[in-house]
Amino acid sequence: MRGLELSQARPTILKIGGSVITDKNTELGVHMDVISRIADELQEANTRNLIIVHGGGSFGHPVAQKHAIKEGFKEEQQIIGFAETHHVMTVLNGLLMDALIWRGIPAVSVTPSSCVMTRNGRIQCFEDSPLKQLLKMGFIPVLYGDAVFDTELGFTILSGDQLVSFLAVRFNAKNILIGVDVDGLYDADPKKNAEAKMFDRLTLDELKNVKGLVGGSTAYDVTGGMSSKIAELMPAVEHGIPVLIFNAAKPKYIYKVLKGDRVKGTVIEKE
Ligand code: IP8
């Protein structure tokens, strides 16, 4: 590929939580203003070697829950439920893609259900050649939590967090930035308990001793709340990749973390 400066640098992985871009109080409720603001910040930050992963929020989760997609194929009626769950995720993804592409950001959507197979809910194979090529050529791949096919269960739900951790290890990421709708990791739910204390920094060992991590989730979150998010991220931290959990609902935070500026949040490091 002559004429192109191909990149081999370690990517940054940015997760945009479903709770940030959607309104979890209404099925298919979307925060278009937030999507636009995030796209503005991504345009301004102009980050290269970036992989974006977004969550399901009020799109994927209620539909997946209604049809018990995570539990796997048990009855015929779930077939349309799987199709619906995947479809609403492509709709949410499309809204973000629209906002990115019309700002001149070279983002390309990569559909997890077409390149991932899981085994009992865990990623078993991931066809990564298109993603490698995208990164090499300077595109920004955008993936999302999705309804995927599973060798044992027939199908299931793959969380954006499992995907983030997997990609971070596979691509030896420089760092992982997890944008949620709270300021970081707390010892109690900050939305319910004003006394909740936020952790500024945790090592892997300290993290293992913290019980009942909460925040940033709702009852219909089929992939679990903050504690399953953290459990998913552990392999990447173990691999030496630092994680920052920060509030992406706050203006300019995505811009700042991409620029490497310090913002309020929780840093998790191996040691
Ligand atoms: O919001 C789940 O992704 P997450 C996606 O990252 C679906 O857990 C389809 C429920």
Image (cartoon, rainbow, N blue to C red):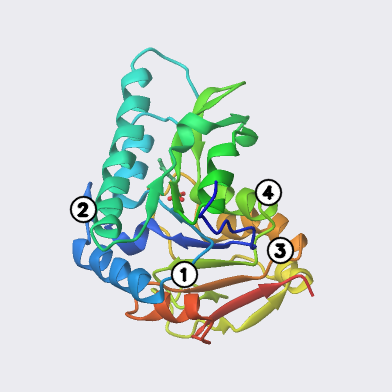
User: Closer to the N terminus: mark 1 or mark 4?
Assistant: 1
**Which numbered disc flags the more N-terminal residue, 1 or 2?**
2
- Would the CB of label 1 be found within 8 Å of ligand 1? no
Q: Is mark 3 within 8 Å of ligand 1?
A: no
On whether ligand 1 comes within 8 Å of the CB at mark 4, the answer is no
User: From mark 1 to mark 2, how far is it between C-alphas?
Assistant: 29 Å
The answer to the question of whether label 1 and label 2 lie on touching residues, with beta carbons closer than 8 A, is no
Q: Secondary structure at mark 4?
A: helix
Which marked residue is nearer to the observer: mark 1 or mark 2? 1
Work out whether mark 4 precedes mark 3 in sequence or the reverse, and give the earlier one: 4
| In contact (CB < 8 Å): disc 1 and disc 4 | no
Q: Is residue 80 left or right of residue 213?
A: left
Residue 47 numbered tag? 1
In the image, which is nearer the foreground, mark 3 or mark 2?
3
Q: What SS does tag 1 mark?
A: loop
Sequence-wise, the earlier of marks 1 and 3 is 1
Q: In the image, which is nearer the foreground, mark 4 or mark 3?
A: 4
Q: CA distance from mark 1 to mark 4?
A: 20 Å
Alpha carbon of mark 3 to alpha carbon of mark 2: how far? 33 Å
* Identity, as a three-letter code, of the amino acid under mark 2: Gly
What numbered label is drawn on residue 237?
3
Please, what is the three-letter code of the amino acid marked with disc 1? Thr
Indicate the quadrant where residue 181 lies: bottom left
* Residue linked to disc 4: 170
Whether residue 170 can be seen here: yes
Please tell me which residue is depicted at 58% across the width and 48% down the height of the picture. Answer: 162
Q: Which mark, by number, is residue 29?
A: 2
Q: Is residue 211 above or below residue 64?
A: below
Camera-side residue: 39 or 84?
39
